[in-house]
Image (cartoon, grey):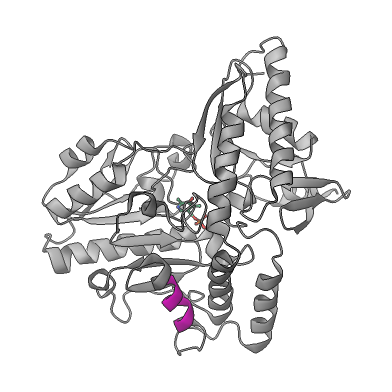
Amino acid sequence: MTAIELENKFSAHNYAPLPVVLARGEGAYLWDVEGRRYIDMMSAYSAASHGHGHPRILAALTTQALRLAVPSRAYYNDRLGPFLKEICRVTELDAALPMNTGAEAVETAIKAARRWGYRVKGIPKDRAEIIVADGNFHGRTTTIIGFSSEPEYRDGFGPFAPGFPSVPFGDLGAVERAITPNTAAVMVEPIQGEAGIIVPPAGYLIGLRRICDANRVLLILDEVQSGLGRTGAWFAFQHEKIKPDGVILGKALGGGVLPVSAFVGRQELMDVFTPGSHGSTFGGNPLAATVGLEALRIIRDEGLVERSRELGTHMLGRLRAIQSPAVKEIRGRGLWVGAEIDPNFASARHVCERLLTKGVLSKETHHTVVRMAPPLIIGRDDLDLALDRFEEVVSELAKMPRPSVAA
Ligand SMILES: *Cc1c(COP(=O)(O)O)cnc(C)c1O
């Protein structure tokens, strides 16, 4: 059986992959089993922001793997402290709780916010509310999908946890109206990734900060995808010069090789955790901590934040200059762009399949948005090559007779 047949037979069908079988990666390149090379314009949803097989990440990984990998947090280890200290330095927050996947760090934030609500704010037992935004994506646990607005994420998986009122993203008035004496936190993505790289109106985070302060409500930002340089700042909240009470990190924190996540917050918030109140067998293991610390250092040493800002401006400029009726809108910030395709011309999936045949890997989000989020280490020439291919594909679409949306 071929690799595709094997996956199709033995894997649950919870993904619909593009028809390419990847076998190797280096930097911003991926190769398939036939040796064809592709430019990676996806970077594993930002998990591979450092590029594939970054030599410093691989060195840190292999050296630490030979020393000590997973002793559990029943004991202290010599790698976790330095890693969390650096996380606190870059986020300018006080303490962190290490986990593995993004969804686990989101769950950690929810637990922290609720307990803070009861123990510090004085919300009556089991009544705490966390306001979220329509179109959110915070992961796939049953609690998290319970407040998703995507029917396909929820269908068949209820009953869901109460306590997550949802308001339109970008609408400050709606947040204000949703606040009650039982509101513990507002939790949003600064830019909604899976929703289609939706950038809120300028001043949104500043407004959220003001509303939260006025009502003694925590502001928690999910920067699992937007953080660590993706938007041309270390964190998207820095574009509006605000300070959140808590930040959720993941994806790029693992340097492209391991799942490493963390919930980072102010002291008062992190102090709600007591021994036994939360944990993870793998969270904070020395191997993950070593890779995470190296991932943070590389971002600083290689100027990846500035790179993302400069190349991102270039990418947005080039995409916005494309004159094609098939492209309805270009949105984004830094090396993170969504191209909204007019479904009268083609589905975003079709565009991604065409890009694949031209050696560029991207992925649609929803049916109309092509996501472009290359590794932050991508060379300008490779970025330009990928953008040339995208321009070719959309200009071909505009020339073709309009197929029906279903085609
Ligand atoms: C990907 C993502 C998550 C979930 O991360 P996993 O590692 O897949 O659990 C949470 N929040 C945001 C904003 C994400 O993009």
**Could you say where residue 302 lies in the image, as x and y percent from the top left?**
61, 64
Does the rendering let one see residue 365? Answer: no
**Residue placed furthest toward the top:** 401
173 in relation to 10, above or below: above
Quadrant of residue 276 within the rendered picture: bottom left
Quarter that holds the C terminus: top right
Q: Residue visible at 22% across and 72% down?
A: 268
**Could you say where residue 336 lies in the image, as x and y percent from the top left?**
54, 44
Q: Is residue 407 magenta?
A: no
Quadrant of residue 404 within the rendered picture: top right
Q: Which stretch did the figure color magenta?
A: 81-87
**Could you say where residue 241 lies in the image, as x and y percent from the top left?**
32, 54
Q: Give the main secondary structure of the magenta stretch.
A: helix
- Considering depth in this image, is 165 or 40 the residue closer to the camera? 40
**Could you say where residue 122 lies in the image, as x and y percent from the top left?**
11, 64
Quadrant of residue 25 within the rendered picture: bottom right
Q: Residue visible at 72% across and 58% down?
A: 27
- Considering depth in this image, is 296 or 137 the residue closer to the camera? 296
Tell me how many marks there are. 0
Classify residue 310 as left or right of residue 356: left
Does the rendering let one see residue 264? Answer: yes
Q: Residue visible at 63% across and 60% down?
A: 50
Q: Is residue 83 magenta?
A: yes
135 in relation to 127, above or below: above
- Considering depth in this image, is 271 or 119 the residue closer to the camera? 271
Q: Residue visible at 18% across and 62% down?
A: 117
